[in-house]
Image (spheres, rainbow, N blue to C red):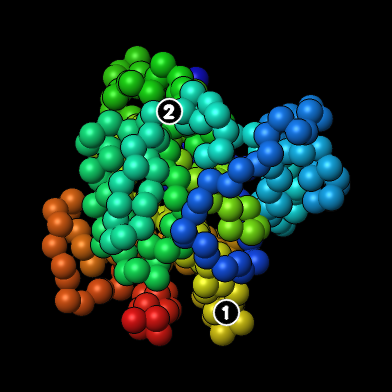
């Protein structure tokens, strides 16, 4: 049996969608009265539509997003109906029990997380500068990034796999063993706190080869990039660097925002952790996966907003 090896770190799926559009943040999120009950048109979760008008006509919560699922690797725009969201009555059935935490004055809903998972999520959020924290979606979930469900397969509790010669060994990042590990994010083209989320596979917290801080920071990087259009602004001046970086990048998307997501991840990881221990570094050093030009882009962006 051949072991399929695909790195799904920072897993992209239809849940890890990206967008070039900017929108204005509205953090003072109030759950709006939706006039529920007035619309009885049936709709299906993630049902696709030709246009936003068609989608809204069904009364469903609509989300336009771009995703890199076309066969040629280019982004495709989809208008979909998303039935799961903060305003769903059964949100805790779908996303798990939620806990609301406040980080630097902003509230976040963490779903389906145990105490240790929640602590790591909060630790990561707490190192972000306020302008980046604002870009983070209000909802962060523990679940299956591929399907957006709470349930992961029974293998999610496994810490070892059996290889083709019958030996047991620890699961490594990227092993495809019925389950993909990593994170994902659901991003609409317009900011929508009710639907959007970052989702982290529970195994990212338990397998030694995984680092939940990296996974979360990578996904946060996608939202930061949407908010500030960093990749759009930088691509012209750094086209060859972006292309070169993506050539050796092993996530399953090739969007330019992947580069910025990686940059955000490495920047904050190096600045605030050394081998998993919290610290604050005074200098951020480049490395093969975090080249100086990428570090400088992230640093300049932070400086421009500080
Ligand atoms: Zn990504």
Q: Label 2: how many residues lie within 10 Å, few (<14), some (14-19) or many (20+)?
A: some
Residue 137 location in percent, x, y? 47, 53
Name the residue: 23% across, 43% down: 119
Tag shown at residue 96: 2
Left or right of 25 in this view: 167? left
Q: Look at the picture and state if 267 lies above or below 278.
A: below
Residue 133 location in percent, x, y? 38, 62
**Which of the marked residues, 1 or 2, is nearer the chain's N terminus?**
2
Name the residue: 39% across, 28% down: 97
**Label 2 SS:** loop
Q: Which residue is mark 1?
A: 233
Tell which of 292 and 54 is nearer to you: 54
Q: Look at the picture and state if 58 lies above or below 230.
A: above
Residue 209 visible in this rendered orientation of the protein: no
Residue 271 location in percent, x, y? 23, 67
Tell which of 115 and 275 is nearer to you: 115
């Amino acid at each position: 049996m051949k072991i399929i090896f695909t790195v799904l770190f920072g897993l992209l799926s239809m849940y890890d969608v990206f967008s070039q559009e900017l929108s204005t943040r509205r953090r003072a999120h109030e759950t709006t009265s939706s006039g529920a009950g007035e619309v009885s048109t049936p709709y299906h979760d993630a049902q696709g539509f030709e246009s936003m008008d068609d989608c809204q006509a069904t009364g469903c919560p609509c989300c336009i997003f771009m995703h890199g699922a076309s066969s040629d690797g280019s982004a495709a725009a989809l208008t979909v109906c998303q039935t799961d969201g903060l305003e769903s009555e059964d949100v805790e059935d779908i996303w798990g029990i939620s806990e609301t935490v406040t980080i630097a004055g902003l509230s976040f809903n963490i779903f389906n997380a145990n105490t240790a998972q929640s602590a790591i999520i909060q630790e990561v959020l707490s190192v972000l500068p306020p302008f980046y924290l604002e870009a983070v979606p209000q909802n962060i979930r523990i679940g299956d990034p591929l399907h957006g469900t709470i349930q992961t397969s029974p293998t999610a509790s496994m810490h070892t796999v059996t290889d083709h010669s019958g030996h047991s060994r620890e699961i490594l990042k990227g092993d495809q063993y019925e389950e993909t590990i990593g994170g994902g994010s659901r991003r609409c083209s317009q900011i929508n706190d009710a639907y959007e989320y970052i989702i982290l596979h529970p195994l990212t917290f338990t397998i030694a080869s995984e680092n939940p801080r990296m996974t979360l920071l990578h996904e946060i990087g996608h939202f930061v990039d949407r908010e500030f259009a960093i990749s759009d602004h930088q691509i012209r001046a750094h086209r060859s660097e972006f292309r070169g970086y993506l050539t050796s990048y092993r996530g399953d998307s090739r969007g330019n925002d992947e580069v910025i997501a990686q940059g955000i991840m490495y920047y904050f990881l190096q600045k605030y952790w050394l081998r998993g221990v919290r610290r604050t570094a005074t200098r951020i050093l480049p490395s093969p996966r975090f080249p100086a030009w990428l570090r400088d882009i992230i640093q300049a962006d932070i400086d421009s907003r500080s």
